[in-house]
Image (cartoon, helix red, strand yellow):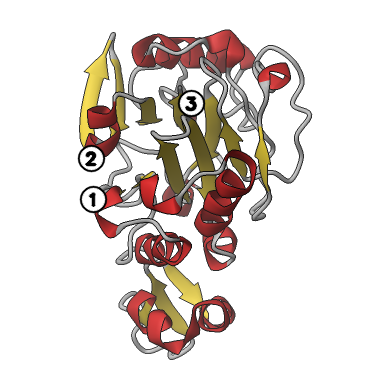
Amino acid sequence: MNKVTKNGVTYMTFSLFETAGIKHGFSTRLGGVSTGVYESLNLGFNRGDSDENVRENFKRIATALDMNYNRMCFSKQTHTTNVIVIDEGKAGNGIIRPNEFNDIDGLVTNVKDLPLVTSFADCVPLFFYDPEKCVVALSHSGWRGTCGKIGKVTIEKMKEVFGTKPEDVLCGIAPSICKDCYEVSDDVAEAFRESFGEADSSKILRPSTMHPEDKNKYMLNLWEACKIALLEAGVKEENIEITDYCTRCNPTLFYSHRIMGAKRGSLAAFISL
């Protein structure tokens, strides 16, 4: 991924999406007005920071990304695999009017100038762009969403509603916790074995390097799991760009729930036609 600083705001972009000319970005914690544990570009309204600071932070990154702040659309994410289509009437949901979407972790639209927004602090941000049908999407993929293959579910929603062909879609896997930092318990590992099968599970699970003495702990590779789900959906491997930035490894650049706990800011993913 590429690290970009514009108007004092630092964010990440994908080369695939830049080449395609699509507006997008994944925030860092640099370039905002928040202070203390939220320093500085906190994009979470529910973290304990003042709404005034958060709104100013959104305005700053909207300007940097050349997106319309007043038309940004959010949802309340709860680690589901629920994906919905956003139409013109939902512009501004969660930013200039109350958030009416509950239990939604994926957003899809073909409406121009309607920025989609999803929130993060270690979970995997998934970006989608179909240049043939002019459709964009974002998904929030924590371990539950990844286990449920929300990336594949999002592709299927694009195909169902807009006639998207998976082989046309460009996908980005943005900064999140990496395979060397994400330790999970045996129940989570077993859920992935059931969802992915033994062959693919061997690519995404390995014995814990943090607690090698504990045979019930595993390291989980969320990036590889998301990639497997996208390939299963029919996306071409050359159309998938995967980050090399870990949120836990880079706490001065990103917020990380594993390091900071609940008292922290939130990152956000953005995409707009």
Residue at 37%, 16% (x, y): give it.
Answer: 65
Q: Give, as a three-letter code, the residue at label 2.
A: Met
Q: Which mark is residue 8?
A: none
Please report the residue visible at 62 percent of the width from the left and 45 percent of the height from the top: 105
Residue 96 as seen in the image, left or right of residue 180: right
Measured from the top left, where is residue 215 in percent x and y? 43, 91
Where is the C terminus found, in terms of image quarters? top left
Quadrant in the rendering for residue 101:
top right
Question: Residue at label 2?
Answer: 1
Instruction: Pick the residue in front: 161 or 218.
Output: 161
Q: Residue at x 34, y 17 (%)?
A: 31
In the rendering, at what x and y percent does residue 23 appear? 37, 22
Residues under numbered marks 3 and 1 in contact, where contact means CB atoms less than 8 Å apart = no
Residue 235: percent from the left, percent from the top?
A: 38, 56
Q: Are marks 1 and 2 in contact (CB under 8 Å)?
A: yes
Q: Residue at x 30, y 78 (%)?
A: 209
Which residue lies under the disc numbered 3? 42
Indicate which label's residue lies in the foreground, 3 or 2. 2
Residue identifier under label 1: 244
Counting from the top left corner in percent of width and height, residue 204 is at 37, 74
Mark 3 or mark 2, earlier in chain? 2
In terms of sequence position, does the residue under pointer 1 or pointer 2 come before the other? Answer: 2
Q: In the rendered image, is residue 133 in sight? A: yes
Q: Callout 3, which amino acid?
A: Asn
Q: Quadrant of residue 52?
A: top right
- Give the answer, above or below, for where 145 lies relative to 261: below
